[in-house]
Amino acid sequence: MKLNCKAMESIEKAISRAIKFRKYNALITETFDLARSQARDAIRRNLKPFAVVVKDCFLIFQNQRISNNMCFKDVIQFCGALHSDSRIKDRREWLILFVRAECNVIDTCRYFSGGCIIGKANMDEFCMGTSTSQGYFGAVKNGLSDEQRLDQDWLIPGGSSGGSAVAVQLGFAEMGLGSDTGGSTRNPAAFTDSFGFKPSYGVLSRYGLIPLVNSLDCPSIIANNVIDCNRFFSKLSAIQ
């Protein structure tokens, strides 16, 4: 029981930090209840839960393995942009056009490794950008910025996976899942004093990733250090 309590505390701490640092605008969608549910499920399966933030270009959808997580189907996909309601009447129908289940790499992270999704990370619209500062959902602010002057001035976090990088930087995600075309994970990692890793194309499943360039984009990892990058990559690649 003590181990279980300690494991849940790590997720609650991550959620508390996400709330504390909302002003940095790293998340588009908060999925705190989902993270708690995933943590309880991980503990039941003797896995150690850890906090994950997922770039908003990855689909999170209902997975039949965990029947009580019905909120999967309500996690809206934006790709960092506001879609026209006249063009897309039902966003859930639009998701099904892309994929019938959630992204494989997220499923692996969550079900087999204990990942708990704290939220969907802010990003440059449709993965096109290097600053995460011009999107519809507002600028993501680097954790190195002067907190007292955030309303007037801030440092950019790089892009396009800026929200994932800032989530790791500010301590409410152990792993930030990003996508990388020509630097979209490695660039913000450098801006935020984190570590970014783009695996070789095809090593991690691209199923459920909405890409900028289909022939180049890869699911990629942001973590606090090289050891964690390797640990998370090993977890994901071993299953897939």
Image (cartoon, rainbow, N blue to C red):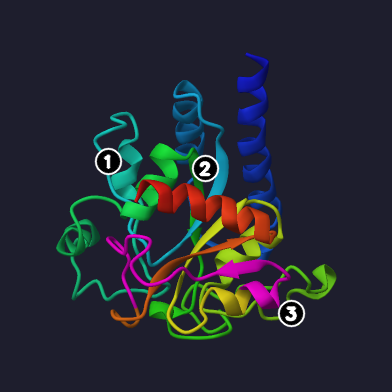
- Horizontal side of residue 158 vs 127, given as left or right: right
Mark 3 crowdedness (10 Å alpha carbons): few <14, some 14-19, many ≥20: some
Give yes or no for contact between labels 1 and 2 (Cβ–Cβ under 8 Å): no
Q: For residue 131, what is the image quadrant? A: bottom right
* Among numbered discs 3 and 1, the one appearing first in the sequence: 1
For label 1, the SS is loop
* Residue 204 sits inside the magenta stretch: yes
Foreground label between 1 and 2:
1
Residue 118 bears which disc, if any?
Answer: none
Give yes or no for contact between labels 3 and 1 (Cβ–Cβ under 8 Å): no
Main secondary structure type of the part rendered in magenta: loop
- Horizontal side of residue 120 vs 217, given as left or right: right
Residue 154 bears which disc, if any?
Answer: 3
Question: Given the image, on which type of amino acid does mark 1 rest?
Answer: Asn
Find the distance from the CA under tag 2 to the CA under tag 3: 27 Å
Task: State the quadrant of the N terminus.
Answer: top right
* Among numbered discs 1 and 2, the one appearing first in the sequence: 2
Residue 226 in view here: yes
Tell me where the magenta segment starts and ends, as one range: 189-211
At horizontal 75% and vertical 74% (from top left) the residue drawn is 150
Residue 139 in view here: no
At horizontal 22% and vertical 60% (from top left) the residue drawn is 95
Query: Horizontal and vertical percent for residue 110?
Result: 43, 42
Question: Given the image, on which type of amino acid does mark 3 rest?
Answer: Trp
Q: Which residue is mark 2?
A: 32
Residue lying furthest top:
1
Foreground label between 3 and 1:
1
Residue 63 bears which disc, if any?
Answer: 1
Mark 2 crowdedness (10 Å alpha carbons): few <14, some 14-19, many ≥20: many
The answer to which of 13 and 165 lies nearer the viewer is 165
Question: Given the image, on which type of amino acid does mark 2 rest?
Answer: Phe
